[in-house]
Image (tube, helix red, strand yellow):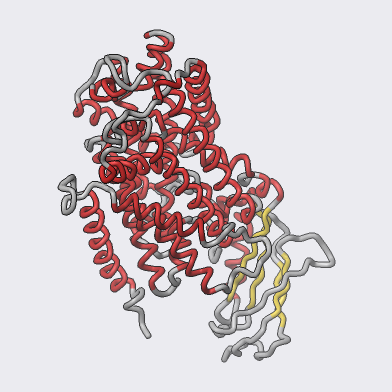
């Protein structure tokens, strides 16, 4: 902190030591090494001693330059920043020249204890994963392959493999750079902080401006579709309006009080766990193995099967998204070099197993074909909107199904609610660091820590995205991330490994069996990207072409921004 006033909101969490020199202007390339010692005569925490390495003498009244010069200033006997500020201001007015001030903040034990533990980090990751999972994507996975059948789980298993390998990549990057920011920090450092890294981090943030709202909107749309089981609302426009209304409510509510997230996270997480436990217990207790029998023509068309596996894998990746959320708050994690990689890997393993069991439980309860089968159910678009409600109705009854529908709605809302605030912090943090558009760095004037402009912009885009079909929302969200985040980070890790300069610390987590998991991650996510809907090859919706075009527009936007900010490649020589 270069401004004492910036510390006021954290006054209860820190101990402050202030050290000031009145010696003059220091050379920028010869920064002083500052050491702090306590006053032997007392316990005043505002007392510090400065060792100045080199000082330029002032023309009027300054000290002579020299490595042994020391200047000791003792502040008032107070721990209050509010009382300290005027005292320092008064002292600075008496100084003969420019005053250089350094502030050292030492965290108290209670602040360190408030950081995320390993269990809390895993809970944070699973909160978003459990909200946007099988309850939303079941009908899409059921109809992913041609012909439909349980062999769609092969693609889902591939997604689990890709994400498990990717969790190792996140683990090493998070252990190597245990700071808040996540992908934009990793890409910036891996590809060169002063060169290509600026472009890659910008492109990640650029795609995040659309992929994050698409992910948020997918949850709100799914939530409104489930409510249709109770309300009878069935049209697409009605679902979109309800979804956008929930989105607007979340933004307004968070704008009023961001502390509600921490207050209700545990409760929402508990509801989510109970919903999943009910599904597992009820489905596995009524499991019928013959319902998972493959159709006789499952592999008659190998080309179509390979393409459909890509769709099933993308659905799986959408379900698993979130195992790396703790990386975005690396600075707020206890023992981050260990906690971050363990939480990423453990969370991914647990959720992959749980989700696969959920699919097995649900798919093994009803037959695939026939009037009561899943194929007929998913062909009925209205029934596909709330497939878990129908599952609960046939399992127990309509009254319980309505109750379970509300449980599913709360589960999805809890995930989306936390996503809205958490995702708003990513462009906000990047803009504060000077690596993205300045407008996102705006902070609410009275509510400290509220990234109000970033929250509002993402909220508006999310509300607009609620008018897109749910399946298209999922695909449009994933396709740009596959290359500009997942593949790019894996490549970035290989670049960092090649340099080999920062891997001499024993506590840094390393990808086991390197480079095999990294290569699997790159090949797997590239396969999912290539098999996405495209117009040029398959004549489908131009998802791939749209993603490439949006990225190219992002490159142009970066060039204009970089030229204005005098960043690479326009910086002064």
Figure check: 347 above or below 384? below
- Residue 530 horizontal/vertical position (percent): 29, 53
Q: Quadrant of the N terminus?
A: bottom right
Horizontal relation, residue 303 to residue 212: left or right:
left
Q: Position of residue 511 (x, y in %)?
A: 57, 58
Quarter of the view holding residue 156: top left
Residue sitting at the far right: 41
Q: Residue at x 64, y 70 (%)?
A: 504
**In the image, residue 493 above or below residue 247:** below
> Looking at the rendering, in which quadrant would you find the C terminus?
bottom left
Question: In x, y percent, where is residue 537?
Answer: 18, 52
Residue 350, by quadrant, is: top right
Q: Answer with left or right where residue 502 lies relative to residue 136.
A: right
Q: Is 191 on the left-hand or right-hand side of 469?
A: right
175 in relation to 93, above or below? above
For image coordinates 28% across by 49% down, the residue present is: 531
Compare residues 103 and 155 and report the one nearer the observer: 155
Q: Is residue 249 visible?
A: no
Q: Between residue 200 and residue 265, name the one nearer to us.
A: 200
Query: Does residue 28 lie above or below 384 as drawn?
Result: below
Question: In x, y percent, where is residue 448?
Answer: 48, 48
Which residue is depicted at the point 67% across and 60% down? 507
Q: Nearer the viewer, residue 551 or 520?
A: 520
Snapshot quadrant of residue 311: top left
The tally of labels here is 0
Let me know if residue 264 appears in the view: yes
Q: Quick one: 417 or 377, which is closer to the camera?
A: 377
């Amino acid at each position: 902190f270069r401004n004492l006033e910036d510390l006021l909101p954290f006054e209860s969490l820190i101990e402050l030591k202030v050290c000031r020199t009145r010696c003059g202007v220091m050379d920028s390339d010869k920064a002083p090494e500052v050491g702090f010692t306590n006053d032997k005569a007392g316990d005043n925490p505002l007392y510090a001693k400065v060792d100045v390495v080199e000082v330029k003498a002032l023309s009027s009244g300054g000290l002579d330059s020299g490595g042994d010069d020391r200047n000791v200033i003792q502040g008032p006997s107070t721990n209050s920043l509010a009382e300290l500020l005027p005292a320092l201001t008064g002292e600075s007015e008496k100084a003969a020249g420019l005053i250089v001030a350094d502030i050292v903040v030492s965290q108290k034990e209670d602040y360190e204890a408030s950081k995320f533990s390993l269990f809390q980090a895993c809970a944070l990751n699973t909160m978003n994963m459990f909200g946007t999972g099988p309850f939303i994507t079941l009908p899409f996975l059921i109809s992913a392959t041609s012909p439909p059948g349980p062999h769609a789980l092969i693609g889902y298993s591939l997604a689990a493999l890709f994400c498990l390998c990717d969790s190792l990549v996140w683990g090493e990057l998070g252990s190597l750079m245990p700071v808040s920011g996540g992908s934009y920090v990793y890409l910036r450092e891996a590809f060169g902080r002063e060169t290509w890294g600026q472009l890659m981090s910008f492109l990640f943030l650029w795609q995040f401006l659309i992929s994050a709202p698409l992910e948020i909107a997918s949850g709100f749309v799914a939530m409104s579709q489930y409510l249709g089981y109770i309300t009878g609302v069935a049209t697409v426009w009605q679902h979109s309006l309800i979804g956008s209304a929930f989105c607007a409510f979340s933004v307004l509510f968070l704008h009023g009080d961001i502390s509600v997230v921490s207050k209700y996270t545990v409760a929402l997480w508990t509801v989510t766990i109970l919903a999943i436990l009910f599904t597992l217990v009820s489905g596995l207790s009524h499991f019928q193995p013959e319902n998972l029998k493959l159709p006789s023509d499952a592999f008659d068309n190998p080309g179509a099967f390979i393409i459909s596996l890509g769709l099933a894998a993308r659905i799986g990746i959408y379900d698993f998204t979130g195992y790396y959320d703790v990386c975005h708050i690396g600075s707020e994690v206890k023992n981050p070099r260990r906690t971050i990689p363990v939480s990423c890997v453990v969370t991914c393993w647990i959720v992959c197993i749980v989700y696969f069991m959920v699919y097995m439980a649900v798919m093994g309860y009803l037959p695939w074909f026939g009037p009561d089968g899943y194929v007929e159910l998913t062909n009925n678009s209205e029934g596909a909107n709330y497939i878990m409600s129908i599952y609960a109705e046939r399992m127990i009854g309509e009254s319980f199904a309505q109750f379970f529908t509300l449980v599913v709605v709360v589960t999805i809302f809890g995930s989306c609610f936390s996503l809205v605030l958490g995702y708003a912090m990513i462009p906000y943090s990047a803009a504060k660091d000077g690596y993205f558009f300045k407008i996102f760095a705006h902070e609410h004037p009275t509510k400290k820590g509220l990234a109000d402009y970033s929250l509002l912009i993402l909220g508006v885009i999310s509300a607009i995205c609620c008018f897109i079909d749910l399946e298209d929302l999922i695909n449009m969200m994933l396709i740009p991330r596959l290359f500009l985040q997942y593949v790019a980070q894996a490549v970035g890790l290989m670049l960092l490994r090649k340099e080999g300069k920062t891997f001499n610390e024993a506590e840094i987590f390393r990808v086991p069996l390197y480079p095999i998991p990294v290569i699997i991650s790159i090949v797997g996510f590239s396969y999912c990207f290539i098999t996405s809907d495209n117009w040029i090859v398959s004549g489908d919706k131009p998802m791939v072409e749209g993603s490439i075009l949006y990225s190219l527009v992002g490159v142009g936007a970066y060039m204009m921004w970089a030229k204005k900010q005098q960043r690479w490649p326009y910086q002064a020589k």
